[in-house]
Image (cartoon, rainbow, N blue to C red):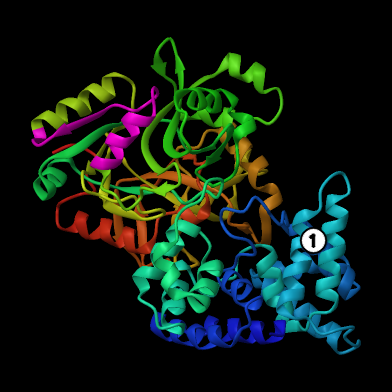
């Protein structure tokens, strides 16, 4: 496939609003791709170059993009920046600049899909002191051979923001339709492989094998997620449930085969070198080959410490020993996904818990089985007294579903309702905050698109604003007056008093009295609240149920 054809498909999808129409169009393309093109196309159409589990990252920011396009077009980087500011869309701006170049030059060679992928692989492989120079050289080569429309989607791919609405759910359904396979088999394989590109290839080559796909050590899978809920509703719906402390820590996945151990963060990044104590604790606690799901908790004098202390350890790459002395981390393991070559995800939670207690000699998180609200509320109160965030209430027969935020697991916390939202823009402050961003535009996920849901400015101290400016200053994609568009790479936890319908934001909703809580450095933008879950919260709120931050 020529990359131009891929770009034309993206352009068509960008103009389609109906989900089923998008699925139909992509499903028609997949069967005619060859085996090498198919997984690349599937990842690209979702705005990704590599699978989520892959350690390879492009590492392309706005500044590198400005420099590459400026070189190819023969202009100043400021001209590129101004073009992006004028459109608010790096892809559209690059397309326009390349269109002007097209009138006065010839193309060196045609780009095809595989070639573009291999060049992006080169970009990701660049390391050391000259890495940025090498990345720039690759980007210049790609844009130098790109037609204007190709440039639109090359720019977006490099920033990993395709903006065409083909999220995982749509692509999963397209794969199932393209190869006439039950969508549940595609979903099963995707949960285990964590790469829809490979799943699509397997669906064509050997569809029967989809049901036999299992998770593999050292290929992390997305972690199962929870919704906000109430104790009373969960017990009313399911009877006996498992109640666990909700730790104010950071999720991890521990993989062990023989003497080799690796730890992955919630964002599926390997963090073993930052957490040697966690790796050592768990390696000593079991002689089995395992994949475990747990929480790293910072403790001092036996009491849990806030999340901010935990994330300092996750970020630490140098002088780890000195940081270990300052911040002690302990593992609390609450699930097992794999044991000695066997996948356990489809087994009920009750069975997985029994297996976990048998194979892990220490560091198993406490779990209580209760069948009445009073008993669960007592555990909830105890959790708060011990310094934990609240409790998790889990259905005993629940399978482990990677990346799924369902009601089989619910979280119960006190205080204000919160949402995890992607930061997609900002506005310069006023007065003493004039040289910093004073407010931030927030968005929810909707099948690959990020839809604004409001702004937050409350709850941010001057000190925090300074830190946030340092975090975002190199992520500015476009400027328009006092407003800037940001590369979507950061998640905020934001409190609110109420969700309202609103025509002012593309999501159709707005938050009443939003308040900044913290940066969720452990979460990727893919884990931001979805439009569907926001709508569900709104419905519960409207019906007087709330989202259940307090036990009933």
Residue at screen point 71% across, 27% down: 318
Along the line of sight, which residue is nearer the eye, 430 or 174? 174
Mark 1 secondary-structure assignment: helix
Residue at position x 24%, y 48% from top? 547
Number of on-image labels: 1
* Segment tinted magenta in the rendering: 350-373
Q: Position of residue 203 (x, y in %)?
A: 48, 75
Locate residue 269: give its quadrant: top right
- Quarter of the image holding residue 62? bottom right
Relative side of 286 to 404, left or right: right
Indicate the position of residue 378 as horizontal and vertical percent values: 15, 25
Q: Residue furthest top?
A: 301
Residue 261 x %, y %: 57, 34
- Within-10-Å neighbours for mark 1: few <14, some 14–19, many 20+: some
Q: Please state, as top left, top right, bottom left or bottom right, where the N terminus lies in the image.
A: bottom right
18 in magenta: no
Location of residue 475 with respect to 79 vertically, above or below: above
Which image quarter holds the C terminus? Answer: top left
Is residue 101 visible to the viewer in this orientation of the structure?
Answer: yes
Which residue occupies 72% across, 54% down? Answer: 59
Viewer-proximal residue among 144 and 114: 114
The magenta stretch spans residue 367: yes
Q: Nearer the viewer, residue 496 or 247?
A: 247
* Residue 210 in the image, given as x and y percentages of width and height: 43, 68
Residue 247 visible here: no
What residue is pinned by disc 1?
Answer: 122
Q: Which residue is painted at 78% across and 84% down in the image?
A: 147
Vertical arrangement, residue 421 with respect to residue 149, above or below? above
Q: Is residue 48 left or right of residue 191?
A: right
């Amino acid at each position: 496939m020529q990359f131009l054809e891929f770009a034309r498909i993206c352009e068509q999808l960008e103009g389609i609003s109906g989900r089923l129409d998008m699925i139909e169009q992509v499903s028609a393309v997949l069967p005619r791709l060859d085996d090498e093109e198919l997984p690349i196309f599937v990842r690209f159409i979702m705005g990704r170059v590599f699978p989520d589990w892959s350690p390879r990252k492009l590492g392309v920011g706005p500044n590198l993009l400005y420099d590459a396009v400026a070189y190819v077009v023969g202009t100043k980087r400021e001209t590129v920046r101004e073009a992006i500011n004028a459109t608010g869309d790096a892809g559209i701006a690059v397309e326009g600049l390349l269109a002007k170049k097209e009138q006065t030059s010839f193309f060196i060679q045609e780009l095809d899909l595989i070639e573009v992928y291999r060049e992006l692989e080169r970009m990701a492989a660049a390391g050391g002191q000259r890495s940025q120079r090498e990345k720039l050289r690759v980007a210049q080569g790609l844009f130098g051979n790109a037609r204007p429309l190709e440039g639109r989607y090359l720019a977006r791919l490099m920033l990993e923001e395709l903006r065409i609405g083909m999220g995982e759910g749509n692509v999963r359904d397209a794969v199932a339709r393209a190869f006439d396979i039950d969508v549940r088999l595609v979903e099963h394989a995707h949960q285990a492989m964590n790469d829809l590109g490979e799943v699509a290839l397997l669906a064509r080559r050997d569809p029967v094998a989809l049901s036999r796909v299992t998770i593999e050590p050292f290929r992390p899978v997305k972690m199962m997620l929870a919704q906000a809920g109430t104790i009373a509703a969960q017990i009313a719906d399911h009877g006996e449930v498992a109640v666990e402390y909700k730790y104010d820590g950071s999720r991890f996945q521990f993989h062990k085969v023989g003497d080799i151990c690796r730890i992955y963060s919630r964002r599926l990044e390997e963090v073993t070198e930052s957490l040697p104590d966690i790796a050592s604790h768990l390696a000593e606690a079991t002689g089995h080959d395992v994949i475990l799901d747990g929480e790293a908790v910072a403790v001092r004098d036996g009491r849990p410490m806030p999340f901010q202390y935990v994330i300092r350890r996750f970020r630490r790459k140098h002088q780890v020993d000195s940081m270990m002395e300052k911040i002690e981390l302990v593992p609390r393991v609450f699930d097992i996904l794999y044991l000695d070559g066997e996948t356990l995800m489809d087994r009920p939670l009750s069975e997985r818990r029994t297996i976990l207690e048998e194979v892990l000699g220490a560091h198993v998180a406490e779990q209580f089985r209760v069948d009445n609200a009073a008993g669960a509320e007592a555990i909830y109160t105890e959790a708060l007294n011990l310094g934990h965030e609240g409790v998790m209430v889990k259905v005993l027969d629940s399978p482990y579903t990677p990346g799924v935020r369902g009601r089989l697991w619910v979280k119960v916390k006190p205080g204000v309702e919160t949402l995890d939202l992607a930061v997609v823009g900002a506005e310069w402050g006023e007065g003493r905050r004039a040289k910093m961003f004073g407010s931030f535009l927030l968005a929810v996920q909707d099948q690959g698109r990020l839809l604004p849901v409001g702004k937050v400015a409350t709850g941010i101290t001057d000190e925090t604003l300074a830190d946030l400016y340092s975090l975002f200053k190199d992520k500015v994609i476009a400027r328009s007056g006092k407003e800037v568009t940001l590369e979507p790479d950061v998640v905020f936890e934001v409190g609110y008093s109420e969700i309202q319908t609103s025509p002012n934001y593309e999501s159709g909703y707005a938050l009443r009295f939003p308040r900044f809580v913290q940066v969720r450095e452990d979460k990727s933008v893919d884990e931001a609240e979805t439009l569907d879950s926001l709508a569900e919260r709104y419905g519960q709120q409207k019906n007087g149920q709330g989202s259940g931050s307090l036990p009933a």
